[in-house]
Amino acid sequence: MALTTRPEQRPTQAERRPSIALSFWQSTLGKKIVMGVTGLIMIGYLCVHMLGNTKIFFGPEEFNAYGHWLRVMGAPVLHHQWGLWIARVVLLASVILHGVSAYQLSRRDIKARPQKYVHTKPRMSYATRTMRWGGVILGLFIVWHVLDLTTGTTHSGGFQEGHPYQNVVDTFSTWYGNVIYIVAMLAMGLHVRHGFWSAAQTLGAGNRTRDRALKAIANALAIVLTVGFISVPVGVMTGVVS
Amino acid sequence: MKLTLRVWRQQNADSPGAMATYQVDDVSQDMSFLEMLDVLNEELILKGEEPVAFDHDCREGICGACSLVINGDAHGPERTTTCQLHMRSFQDGDTIDIEPWRAAAFPVIKDLVVDRSAFDRVIQAGGYITAPTGSAPEAHATPVPKADADYAFEHAECIGCGACVAACPNGAAMLFTSAKVNHLNVLPQGSPERETRVLDMVSQMDAEGFGGCTLTGECATACPKGIPLFSITAMNKEWLRASRKVKR
Ligand code: HEM
Ligand code: FES
C-alpha cells in the first residue's frame, strides 16, 4: 500500500546521518557557517587588538606593560603565556578553517558557472567583489605581520624581544612598512563590512526588520577598526609616536 | 520598431555554440518578448533557416518555463518573466543580446533551452508533504496563523524558473531551494518533514553541482516573483536547527 514518494536514489542526508562535523564540512551551507563563525571570532579578536594598539599613544611604558600583560593573561589560573597560546591556537585554527573553506567554496563557485555571459555588466557592490582577493591580501598580511612584529624574522633594524613599542616605531619608519600595513587595513575594512553582514545571514540571524541595524553595525565596525588600526602608522609618521 | 538581435545559437549539448546576429523589422511595442521571437522564427522558417529554440509554456508568468538572459539580465530589464516582458521596455534601433541561463547544473540542450531537471531532483529530495490524497481535506481542520500563511504564500510564489541560478555569479540555487523549504517548513502540513526536508534538499542541491552563496543578492534582484534575499537567511537558520535536531 505504502507508496514511496521518492524514486530509487542514493540515501538522503537525513538517512545517512553523518556526524555533525562531517555534515557541516561536506555541505556548502555548513562550510559557510564555519566561515561565518571563524570570521566572527577573528572580528572579535580584531576589536580587542585594535583597542590594545591605541595604548601606543600613551607612551612606551604603558604599551610595553600591555605587551607583558598579554603573556601573564589569565594568571594565576593559567601558567605563564598559556592564555596567549590559547588565543594563538584559536586564531590559527580560525584563519586556517576560514581560508580553507573560502578556497574550497570559491573553487566550487567558479566551477558552477563555467561559461560567462557575453553581455556582462558589473553590479555587485565593491566589498562583495573584493572578498576573495581581499581575503588573500589579508592572509599574506597576517604572515608578514607575525614575521615582522611577533617573531621579528623580517623586522627592519634590530628586533628587540619584549620592546614592542620600539619595534612598532621601527616598522612604521620604513615606507614599505606603512604601505603594506595601510593597504592591508583598507582591505580588512572592506572585508569586515561585507563579512559581518554576511555572517549574520549565514548564521540565520538576519531578517527584514533587523537589516538596517546589521548594516549599520557592519559599517561602524569596518570604519572604527580601519581608523583605529591606521592611527598607529599615522601616529608614527606624524611624530606623535616616536 | 526595428531591432538587431544577437542570439546564442547552439546545435546541441556537445557543439560549441556562438552568438548570431539577426534583424527584425516588424516589431510592435505591444508585443511580448516571446512574440517578438515568434516573428523572428517565422522569418527564419520562411528563409529555410532553423528557428531559434526557446522554452515557453503558459506565457502568462505562472509556469516558469520561459528563461532568457536579455542584455545580461535574467528575464530582461523589468521585474517579471520573459513572457510578460513587453517590447515597450526597449527602444527602436536597439541591439538586444539574448543568451540562455548559464550554470554548470543547467546544461544547454539547444540554442536558448537549458536542462533544468536538477530543480526537479531538488524538489524530489524534500519539496513535498505527507498527506492522504484522494479526497480534499476539510479546509478548517488545520488552522494556520495569518502571518504564517502569508509567509508561506510569499515563498510559494516561486515558479522554479531558475532566474536566480542564472543571475548568481556562483550559479547557486540557494534562492530557489530556500523558497521551497520556507514555503513548506512554516506550515503545519509541512512540519513532519521539517528537518529532513531542509537537510535533504540542501544536500541534493549540492550534489547537482550548484555553487554556494556569497550573498551578492543578484538572485533576489532577478527573481520575477520577488522572493526576498532573507529567504536564504531563513533557510540557513532551518538548516542549522535541523543539523542539531536530527538524531544521529
Ligand atoms: C582578520 C582576518 C579575517 C576576518 C576578520 C574575516 C572575516 C570574515 C567574515 C566575518 C566573513 C563572512 C562569512 C560569511 O559569509 O558567513 C568572511 C568571508 C570571507 N572571507 Fe574572511 N576574514 C578574514 C580573513 C580572511 C582570509 C585570510 C581570507 C582568504 C584566505 C578570507 C576570505 C574570505 C572569503 C573568500 C569570504 C567569503 C565572502 C563571501 O562569501 O561573500 N578572509 N570573512
Ligand atoms: S512562459 Fe510560463 S512563465 Fe513565462
Image (cartoon, coloured by chain):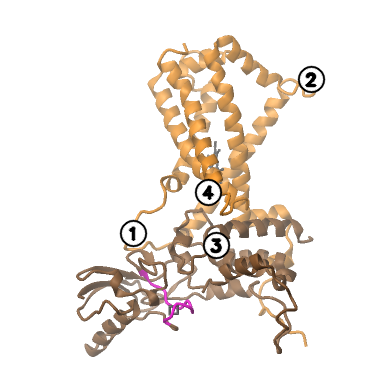
- Secondary element at image label 3: helix
As drawn, A203 above or below B43: above
Task: Tell me the distance, in whole angstroms, between the alpha carbons under discs 1 and 3.
Answer: 22 Å
Tag 2: amino acid: Pro
Chain B: what color? brown
As drawn, A221 above or below A17: above
Visible in this render: residue A215? yes
Residue B150 sits in which quadrant?
A: bottom right
Nearest the eye: B30 or A60: B30
- Secondary element at image label 2: loop
Task: Tell me the distance, in whole angstroms, between the alpha carbons under discs 3 and 4.
Answer: 19 Å
Visible in this render: residue A173? no
Q: Residues within 10 Å of mark 4 (few under 14, many from 20)?
A: some
Tag 3: amino acid: Met
Identify residue for label 1: A120
For the record, the magenta segment spans B59-69
Identify residue for label 2: A76
Task: Tell me the distance, in whole angstroms, between the alpha carbons under discs 4 and 2.
Answer: 40 Å
